[in-house]
Image: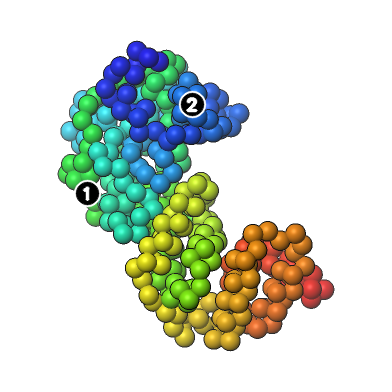
Amino acid sequence: MSELLDNPQLSLFSERLPRRPYCSDDLGAGLRILPLQAALEKKFIQYNPPAIINWMAFDIDRVYLGHENEWRIVAPPNIVVRNPANGHAHLLYGIAAGVSKTSASKAAPLRLLAAINESYRHILGGDIGFTELICKNPLHSHWNVELLRADLYDLHELAEYVDLDASDKRVRATPKRSQVGLGRNCNLFNSLRTWCYKWVGEYQGGSLERWHEAVRGKAEKLNTFKDPLPASEIKATAKSVAKWTWTNYTGKMTASSMAEEGLTPETFSMLQSNLGKMAMAKRWGDNSDKKAEAFKMKVGGVKQAAIAAALGVTQKTVSVWLRNVVN
């Protein structure tokens, strides 16, 4: 391990890892979260922090030879990590200026990186089911490691090799549930900020804490991908978007926006009142008050999704509560 860290590329890899990454020696046994020094001893490791993309990785689920001609089509990776048993590999590209997955003020770099990521995956034949969380740890002696480039990449340099318009069209044409990789982050980010633009003005008379709770609840409901984003990413994205819209946006709910949510001005006031009560209480020992409030809001014409967001529970839970009341 110490000898490998003497290499500038691998030392840089370790320096840009999360402080407490997911890791494992056997993916079949699941993942653990460990302090970085302990995680570095594992065969598999989380290669990006929750909110920042420092490395772009591709899973080559076949014998990977990495012929030189391939690098005339796309840029060569910084690091190739091969399985000596079957030749399968992970290709790692280092991003010079880490790209935020969550910053509402800097959405363009994420969209650009998502298009680059899809283009490279398509050309390299990377596994479309790769969740982009864990990679073969290049600092572990179990793998064969090849170092191809010392300098990190600027996004525009990576983009020079590919057709971003074609990539963007593929991402947009993919149904939400089937989206993978950074396409999920872009979808979540765009859907969440659009919702926030409609709602933030109605919360700005109250507390920022109440707004954070509402945005996080909405983000969790939007995370309906086949391979959902980790909870840490949902939390970070919700926090960033909530903070940015609270500070920079003063939109108000229109009558049509309220109608889309199944609200009238009167029922919206009821919803706001209930959210205020929720912010005052960190825990509810008994759900009876929540159930009563859910029924009251339903009678007032509020949709189940909005009720769930207000009460901090799932829509399924609200459905069960209301069904039991009716029965």
**Which SS class for mark 1?**
loop
Image location (x, y in percent) of residue 68 = 21, 25
Q: Which mark is residue 163?
A: 1
Among the 4 quarters of the image, the one containing residue 301? bottom right
Depth check, front residue: 172 or 110: 110
Are there few (<14), some (14-19), or many (20+) residues within 10 Å of tag 2?
many
Quick check: can you spot residue 202? Answer: yes
Nearest to the eye among marks 1 and 2: give it. 2
Q: Is residue 312 above or below residue 92?
A: below
Image location (x, y in percent) of residue 265 = 54, 86
Quick check: can you spot residue 122? Answer: no
Residue drawn at 44 percent across, 62 percent down: 242
Residue type indicated by callout 1: Asp
- First in sequence: mark 1 vs mark 2: 2
Image location (x, y in percent) of residue 102 = 39, 53
**Outermost right residue:** 327
Are there few (<14), some (14-19), or many (20+) residues within 10 Å of tag 1?
few
Q: Which mark is residue 39?
A: 2
